[in-house]
Image (cartoon, rainbow, N blue to C red):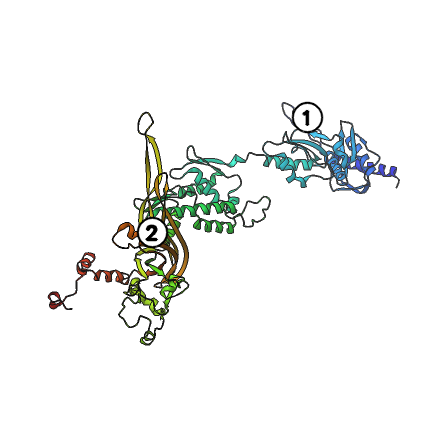
Amino acid sequence: MTPRIFRVWLLAVVASSCLSVAAQTPVEEPAAQATPPAPPAAPEEMVGPLKWPDVPLELVLEMMETWTNRTVLRPQALPPATISLKMKEAVPKSEAIRAVETALNLNGIAVVRMGERFLKVVPMQSARIESPQIIEGSSLDLPPSGQIVTKLFQFQFLRVNEFLPQIGALFNQNVSAPVIFEKSNAALITDSITTIQRIEALVEKLDQPLVSNLSPKFYNIHFAKASDLINKLRAMLQGPLQSQLGSATSYSADDRTNQVILICDPRQHVFFDELIAKLDVKSDPNTSNEVIYLKHAAAKDVASLLNSLVSGQTKAAQSSGSAQPGAGIQQPVAQPNQPPSANPAIAAAIGELGSTQFSSLVTIIPDDRSNAVVINGTKDDIRLITELVDKIDIVLAQVRIEVVIAEVVLSDSASTGISELGLDVAGNRLMGIKGSAPGLNVGGNSSSPYFYGQTPDTAAHGGPYLLNNDFAATAGSFSLVGIISLTSTPRKGNSRILSVPSITTTHNKEAKLFFGETRPVVSGSTSGSTTGNGNDFARSSTIQQQEIGTTITVKPLIGNDGSVQLDIKQTISDVTGEVTVDSNTQYIIGKREMNSFNTVKSGEIIVLGGMQKENNTHSTSRLGPIPWIGDLLGSRSRTKVRSELVVFIRPTVLTNTPADNAPALKQIDAMPDPGAIRQKLDPNYVPPKVPFYKKHIEIP
């Protein structure tokens, strides 16, 4: 069948269809009315039924010219296509035209109207540049079709650069992309009428104010601070809870009026009413004051220690970044359009840090009058400081330090005072006696045949006296002078005891012993005129007392096992001569100093020596009674004497038991009236009964 014959056949089919439809249309009889109505509109021409199996594009365009009474303009290159269209019943011609336009669009061909006489048929990709019809009003009133049109959408509340990417799947990718006018918040869209209608329906639903269903509410806060309450709400309502409340829910604080401003759906008011009412209750302040009375420690020292601890912890937290809890915990990757979720690891870290760290509100001040520490801070601060004070404010261990300072005159063959006395010293500790020494008795009783630690056999043969462990354990009941007794004998006196002090101090508390005298020393002098003419001058001197003697400073460190570490500083000063300075006689003071650190057990004896000095003396004797001649002819002698100070130190750890008072009670018992002294010390003391004959009869 040639194209011309096919065209004739197609026109015949369409004409017969139109005639059959017209024949079936009944003729309306005019109504019998007084006033004739307006003539009804002429019925639209009906087309169909149609059955186009793979009709060539040229025939379809000719049919469009026939139905629209317009001339079709087309380019030489159009997508090759055959159109298939079936309509089972007759339809109005306008609907048939829309059906054909839609079928052409499905095959990549667009129909663009140009005025009242022409139709432009172009490929779908070129439709947007062929000046398609612009819809001024709403497109929802138009019948849906695949006709390519253009519409300008003006958004009121939506943001065009956020809305269009979300509906990008609705556009026909073969037509064109929307043109966005960001400053005007508008978009120019070219697409089929069907697509334009879908977009317009979405815009009508979505381009609405977000507060259309929101209602504000103001809460007057009575006890809490509005900003603190808001921070608490934000900490509680995060993660999944925030997503359930919705993104439109907002709450903020107005500290000026102490109000909480809530903007949300009215149905959520009940939830926030109950939540805010529970949070806005009267409670104790965040910080409080506490006074901790100290029993043993000094308030100033404890406050200084606590302030150093708080400041050190704060600096360490700032430098390491732990001021932001959870900073080192790996955060989950945030998904788009999802609220942040709560991290249980961060919550655990914050809770742990909050229970062991001081807050920035803590203040610690000592009160010297009551020996107390005044604290201001949170409950956790007060709890932490109270625990620390309970561990710090304890009774420190005490130690009694007995000292014997002896001066030993050295013989020509003796190198040290320790060897002169025959002492066995190892590691500065007295271990025993080697041989015998003139004037030396151990045990406090020179008449005893043997000493403690010796057997009668070893004593008879001059065996050494050894201090064993039993002696170290029991020597605390004997005085140091009784254990080491340096006495003079009629045959030779080469040693003498200078001082026997005994002091008690606590752990890490320095104790000082001084044996000697003070002498006035001129520390400065001033001169001034005594008369107005300036010829007479007077000089005044400033006197300072100078200690001259032996000074021993001991700082003990007491261990839990009964050991004692002694930091000993020994200083000996004496006058070695005189010198005249500015007409003032000044003393030349020789000074010897020694530092040592020793570790011994309680009751062991430390021996320190090596402080030697040499005295040169010149003496003359008078011959006869004549003064001048006798002195001239008398004998002269020069003597050089070397001496050394030997210091015995015995620390004894006190156990806070009656045994600590035994040495003092023994000294009291040696006094003339010990009973009266004991009654003064202890009113409940009952002196022992003395037999009658001992009171009145003196027994030799």
Q: Quadrant of the C terminus?
A: bottom left
- Label 2 is placed on what type of residue? Gly
**SS at circle 2:** strand
* Residue 180 sits above or below residue 476 on the image: above
Q: Which residue is mark 2?
A: 549
- Marks 2, 1: nearer the viewer: 2
* Residue 118 sits above or below residue 297 on the image: above
Q: Disc number at residue 354? A: none
Q: Residue 230: horizontal and vertical position, in percent?
A: 45, 40
Q: Disc number at residue 39? A: 1
Using the rendered view, name the quadrant where residue 270 is placed.
Answer: top left
Whether residue 3 is visible to the viewer of this picture, yes or no, is yes
* Residue 455 sits above or below residue 561 on the image: below
Using the rendered view, name the quadrant where residue 340 is placed.
Answer: top right
Q: Residue 471: horizontal and vertical position, in percent?
A: 33, 68
Query: Depth check: 532 or 135 in front?
Result: 532
In the image, taking residue 600 as reference, residue 10 lies left or right, namely: right
